[in-house]
Image: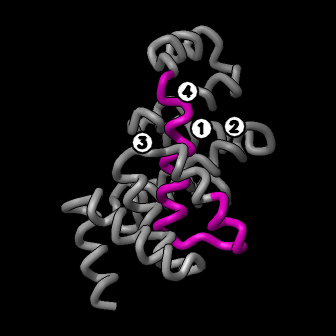
Amino acid sequence: KEETFRIRQQIVTDPQSAEASIRDLLAKDPQTDEAKVMLLQVLHQQERFEECRELLQELEGRGFLEPECQRIQSEISMLDKESVDVDDLRYRVAKDPKDYALQLELAQALAAGRQYTDSLDVCLQLVSMDRRGTGEPARLLMLDIFRVEGDDSEVTQEYRRKLSMALY
């Protein structure tokens, strides 16, 4: 436990040393989930997202993910839309406000750019206007943002309330 505590501190202060220590733990016991979660954290911190995806897939094979793993998974899934031109999407949405698929694309791009409030606003509209279509993926995107922001975030608390009201 003391070694685990030391490694958890190293993840923030010295990711390379932490990774070496975690890999040593995994060499001794390749099935230890705690070490795999710590490895995921250190890989994520180093922005080694492809390795994160592979490890997440392995961890998901257990049938569940720890909250920290879910947060990392959510953040990485949003990054896939990071290179999208948000200004172009806003322009196209303004020209065709009934194109809900385009609005969803805009919400995803905003989330990838960490413009969470703007993304959540678009998602809420989709949940309200197109619940059975783009509303469901919009709701799931909102849940991803909540995981990334954390339960204590004011944004999460505010938009959870708004989502709840939109759904009921």
Crowding near pointer 2: few (<14 within 10 Å), some, many (20+)?
some
Residue type at mark 2?
A: Met
Disc number lying in front (3 or 1): 3
Q: Which residue position holds label 4?
A: 106
Query: Residue 75 in magenta?
Result: yes
Q: Provide the major secondary structure of the magenta segment.
A: helix
Labels 2 and 1 touching (C-beta < 8 A): yes
Residue 122 falls in image quadrant:
top right
Q: Earlier in the sequence, mark 4 or mark 3?
A: 4
Residue 99 is left or right of residue 16, and the answer is: right
Q: Which residue position holds label 3?
A: 116
Q: Earlier in the sequence, mark 4 or mark 2?
A: 4
Q: Secondary structure at mark 3?
A: helix
Extreme residue toward the bottom, this view? 1
Labels 4 and 2 touching (C-beta < 8 A): no
Q: Secondary structure at mark 4?
A: helix
Extreme residue toward the left, this view? 13
Q: Secondary structure at mark 2?
A: helix
Its colouring scheme is one colour
Q: Which residue position holds label 1?
A: 125
Q: Earlier in the sequence, mark 2 or mark 3?
A: 3
The residue lying toward the viewer, choosing from 140 and 73, is 73
Distance Cα–Cα, label 2 vs label 1: 6 Å
Q: Earlier in the sequence, mark 3 or mark 1?
A: 3
Residue type at mark 4?
A: Leu
Q: What stretch of residues is rendered in magenta?
A: 57-83
> Could you tell me residue 89's position as x and y percent?
54, 16
In the image, which disc is placed on residue 1? none
Distance Cα–Cα, label 3 vs label 1: 14 Å
Q: Which residue position holds label 2?
A: 129
> Could you tell me residue 116's position as x and y percent?
42, 42
